[in-house]
Image: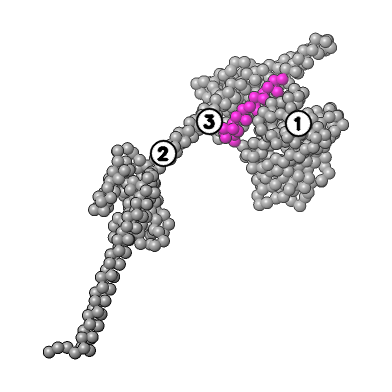
């Protein structure tokens, strides 16, 4: 039986609908496949792009899934550098263990366990390249913002490590050079000071001998000329000694081996020493000399008095050189403030001399610098004084400010902060301010010291130096017995009854037994005076560390050569009042 027309229409519509569904499904399938193909093409393109970027260098990039630790990406240079294919790592992540040792892997795993994914996990290790060569790597692991992968970066820093090792070698060689230089300077200091001690001692003996001549001889022209020659020879010797000291100081500063003493001293007494040192010379030149102590309520501080003196003396010496008759030199000590346990103060040396050219001010603290060649010829000097002063003040954690006008004069200002000496009754001057207009420091009258009648034991291996020192000390009234080395000094001391010797003067560098060893041996003796007899080093080893060692060994002090016999008498002598 045939279908009616409306039924045929229904069947046709249904068939068209089914055809549309089939065609839609096919089209959708084609679209998905196209998108997948496009994605694969884009992935291959991006992979090739990143492989070109990351695979051409020495840094290897790798990503692992955070959950399954599956390899997701490995830069193309891995096989070239490591000799490990990507499929090997895909098959077993342990393939990476071939590039390093168990020790580094264990260290990395311990860090990995402690790492929580925040920041970077860093590990340096030594591995092998594909050709078996040793390579240094720096590994950094991070978690990108997506948070679902670990990003590993293996950077070859072999060249950096080699460069670092080269630099470390250079540093070691430089440090060794510094040690050699320091040892050389120490030896040179000793070798130079020893003959200088003899020269200055001979000059002192010559002057003593000349002073004993009768009045008839003293009235002759020849006596006057001899005295003048001796005075000039001593002056030149002192200049040479100062130059030697400057060169040695500058060398130790440059090598970083200069040490500062930390000893208590009185700023007022320090100022008085400076005034006494310069007043006669300045006034003889026709220059007005003024010294001020302003606003102090602290007198005693802890620092290196000798090195501070070196700075101020340098400034004053230049002021004297460049200030003509009729001018004025003023030295001002001013307390700025007191904070906690330190007193901050300023020392200013002001003169009305020739002043300094602005161009030279820029390089005034450089070694061997002088303003002009004519200055060097007219006034002398090595050009080291300012450089040494600047470095000394820096070591004291202070600073220098210079203000100068050509034709009007110069100001040299030193700003320092020293700890207050609270162990001394004069460490604090409570509720008292020093008179601001005081031009001269009031100091207690100095005690007079003598060695007359003292019995001294001197250990000195140098024949000439021993002869000179004994002659001068005997001229001053002392009785001196000499030992040629430390062992002989120990035997002489132990061979006499307690109290036989008043003081021992001990050279340091001696054969058989040096001065430090002899001192330690004397202090260990089982007799009543072994621990209390004064023992003083007389040594050409004049650096701070040498003096500290002398005291630590058990000596009472350290007097440097060339010997200043006035200082020696003040150090070991008895007071006359």
Mark 1 or mark 3, earlier in chain: 3
Closer to us: mark 3 or mark 2?
A: 2
Magenta stretch: dominant SS?
helix
| Quarter of the rendering containing residue 230 | top right
Which residue carries the number 1 mark? 318
Q: Position of residue 562 (x, y in %)?
A: 65, 23
The image quadrant where one finds the C terminus is: top right
Residue 44 lies in the magenta-colored region: no
| Quarter of the rendering containing residue 311 | top right
Closer to us: mark 1 or mark 2?
A: 2
| Quarter of the rendering containing residue 561 | top right
- Using the image, determine if residue 253 lies above or below residue 345: above
Q: CA distance from mark 3 to mark 2?
A: 28 Å
Q: Nearer the viewer, residue 488 or 128?
A: 128
Which residue carries the number 2 mark? 159
- Using the image, determine if residue 328 lies above or below residue 199: below
Q: Nearer the viewer, residue 541 or 377?
A: 377
Left or right of 74: which side holds 318?
A: right
Left or right of 23: which side holds 564?
A: right
Q: CA distance from mark 1 to mark 3?
A: 32 Å
Q: Secondary structure at mark 1?
A: helix
> Does residue 226 appear in this view?
yes
Q: Secondary structure at mark 3?
A: helix
User: What numbered label is drawn on residue 178?
Assistant: 3
Q: Residue at x 21, y 88 (%)?
A: 5
Q: Disc 1, disc 3: CB below 8 Å? A: no
Left or right of 345: which side holds 517?
A: left
Q: Secondary structure at mark 2?
A: helix
Q: Disc 1, disc 2: CB below 8 Å? A: no
Left or right of 572: which side holds 48?
A: left
**Residue extent of the magenta highlight:** 236-259
Mark 3 or mark 2, earlier in chain: 2
């Amino acid at each position: 039986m045939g279908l009616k027309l409306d039924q045929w229409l229904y069947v046709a519509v249904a068939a068209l609908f089914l055809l549309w569904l089939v065609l839609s499904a096919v089209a959708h399938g084609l679209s998905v496949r196209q998108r997948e193909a496009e994605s694969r093409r884009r992935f291959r393109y991006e992979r090739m792009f990143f492989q070109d970027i990351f695979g051409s260098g020495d840094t290897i990039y790798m990503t692992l899934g955070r959950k399954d630790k599956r390899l997701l990406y490995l830069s193309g240079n891995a096989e070239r550098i490591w000799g490990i294919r990507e499929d090997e790592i895909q098959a077993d992540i342990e393939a990476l263990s071939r590039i390093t040792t168990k020790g580094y892997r264990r260290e990395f795993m311990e860090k990995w366990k402690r790492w929580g994914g925040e920041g970077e996990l860093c590990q340096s290790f030594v591995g092998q390249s594909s050709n078996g060569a040793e390579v240094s790597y720096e590994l950094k692991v991070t978690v990108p913002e997506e948070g679902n992968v670990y990003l590993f970066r293996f950077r070859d820093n072999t060249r950096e490590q080699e460069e670092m090792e080269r630099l470390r070698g250079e540093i070691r060689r430089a440090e060794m050079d510094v040690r050699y230089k320091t040892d050389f300077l120490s030896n040179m200091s000793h070798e130079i000071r020893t003959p200088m001690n003899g020269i200055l001692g001979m000059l002192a003996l010559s002057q003593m001998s000349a002073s004993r001549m009768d009045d008839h001889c003293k009235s002759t022209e020849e006596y006057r000329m001899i005295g003048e020659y001796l005075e000039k020879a001593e002056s030149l010797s002192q200049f040479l000694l100062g130059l030697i000291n400057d060169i040695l100081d500058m060398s130790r500063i440059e090598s970083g081996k200069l040490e500062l003493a930390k000893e208590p001293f009185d700023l007022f007494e320090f100022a008085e020493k400076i005034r006494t040192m310069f007043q006669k010379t300045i006034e003889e030149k026709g220059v007005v000399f003024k010294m001020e102590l302003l606003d102090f309520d602290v007198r005693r501080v802890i620092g290196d008095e000798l090195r501070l003196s070196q700075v101020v003396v340098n400034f004053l010496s230049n002021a004297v050189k460049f200030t003509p008759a009729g001018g004025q030199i003023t030295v001002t000590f001013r307390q700025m403030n007191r904070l906690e346990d330190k007193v901050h103060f300023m020392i200013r040396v002001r003169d009305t001399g020739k002043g300094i050219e602005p161009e030279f001010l820029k390089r005034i603290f450089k070694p061997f610098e002088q303003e002009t060649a004519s200055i060097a010829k007219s006034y002398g000097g090595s050009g080291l004084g300012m450089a040494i002063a600047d470095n000394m003040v820096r070591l004291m954690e202070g600073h220098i400010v210079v203000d100068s006008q050509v034709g009007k004069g110069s100001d040299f200002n030193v700003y320092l902060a020293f700890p207050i000496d609270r162990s001394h009754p004069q460490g604090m001057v409570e509720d008292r301010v020093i008179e601001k207009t005081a031009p001269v420091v009031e100091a207690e009258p100095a005690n007079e010291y003598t060695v007359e009648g003292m019995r001294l034991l001197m250990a000195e291996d140098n024949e000439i130096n021993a002869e000179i020192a004994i002659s001068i000390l005997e001229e001053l009234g002392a009785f001196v017995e000499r030992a040629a080395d430390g062992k002989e000094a120990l035997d002489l001391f132990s061979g006499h009854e307690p109290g036989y010797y008043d003081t021992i003067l001990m050279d340091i560098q001696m054969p058989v037994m040096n001065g430090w060893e002899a001192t330690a041996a004397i202090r260990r003796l089982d007799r009543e005076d072994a621990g209390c007899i004064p023992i003083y080093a007389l040594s050409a080893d004049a650096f701070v560390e040498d003096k500290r060692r002398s005291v630590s060994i058990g000596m009472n002090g350290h007097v440097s050569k060339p010997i200043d016999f006035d200082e020696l008498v003040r150090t070991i002598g008895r007071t006359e009042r």
